[in-house]
Amino acid sequence: MLAKAMTSHIASLDGKRRILEVGPGTGPFTKAILRKLRAGDHFDLVEINQTFCRKLEKDVLAPYRARHPQVTVRLHCAPIEDADLAGPYDAIVCGLPFNNFPPKLVRQIFRRMFALLKDSGELVYFEYAGVRVLKSPVVDSDGRARLKRIDAIGKSLRRKHEGKKELVLGNFPPAFAYRLTGNAAAKSKRKA
Ligand SMILES: C[S@@+](CC[C@H](N)C(=O)[O-])C[C@H]1O[C@@H](n2cnc3c(N)ncnc32)[C@H](O)[C@@H]1O
């Protein structure tokens, strides 16, 4: 359910598409993306965890490449902050758990992703519904302050990048998929 919401926009993109997935883990979103790719498309994935990289490569990517030699699929086992990637991408699908990260890293990662995204492209990320309400009572005051700052970063990005949110109730736990447009939206807002 969440994988469908996170990847639905890819099918509507024309021509040869360049797609980036950030933090694929064991690949639930990856599999949904692969189903939408066509000959000539380019798909990069960036995953920091070596164990997930090995498993994803063996179970999902290598078998896909063998069946679809005209699609380029590259897994980069590295952090998104400094992975060797060449944008621009038409779409970025991000599975990172931002509420577990320091705010400075959240900002750094979004800056990197927007630098890699086409001005007309779309970036999708998610968070579980109510995650801050659920976490707040079990973290200390520093933790609560950190969660508030991450919430503020998300709100500011959604204002700048014409954010749209979709509640995916059929997922367990329910989650919001957030869609942000590339820098074209942010530039036209600055002009207005
Ligand atoms: C919550 S999991 C999401 C996996 C998958 N999309 C899902 O829904 O199951 C987040 C993944 O991001 C990876 N990750 C965390 N920080 C990262 C970073 N800075 N760069 C790339 N991947 C990262 C983790 O190793 C993990 O596999």
Image (spheres, rainbow, N blue to C red):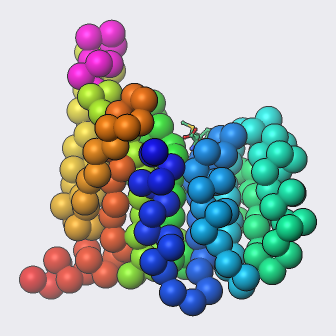
Residue at (50% x, 70% y) in the render = 10
Residue at (46% x, 45% y) in the render = 1
Left or right of 156, for residue 18: right
Residue at (19% x, 61% y) in the render = 159
Residue at the bottom extreme of this rendering? 15
Q: What range is drawn magenta here?
A: 132-139
Place of residue 112 in the rendered image (x, y in percent of width and height, measured from the top left): 50, 62
Place of residue 45 in the rendered image (x, y in percent of width and height, measured from the top left): 67, 58
Q: Split into 4 quadrants, where in the image is the C terminus? A: bottom left
Q: Is residue 115 visible?
A: no
Residue at (34% x, 76% y) in the render = 183
Q: Is residue 54 magenta?
A: no
Place of residue 149 in the rendered image (x, y in percent of width and height, measured from the top left): 26, 37
Q: How many marks?
A: 0
Left or right of 153, for residue 101: right
Place of residue 92 in the rendered image (x, y in percent of width and height, measured from the top left): 51, 64
Magenta stretch: helix, strand or loop mostly: helix
- Image position of 35 with respect to 18: above or below: above
- Image position of 77 with respect to 172: above or below: below
Residue at the left extreme of this rendering? 192
Q: Is residue 133 magenta?
A: yes
Camera-side residue: 129 or 133?
Answer: 129
Q: Quadrant of ligand 1?
A: top right
- Image position of 167 with respect to 83: above or below: above
Camera-side residue: 152 or 73?
Answer: 73
Left or right of 152, for residue 93: right
Q: Is residue 152 visible?
A: yes
Residue at the right extreme of this rendering? 66
Camera-side residue: 58 or 89?
Answer: 58
Q: Quadrant of residue 53?
A: top right
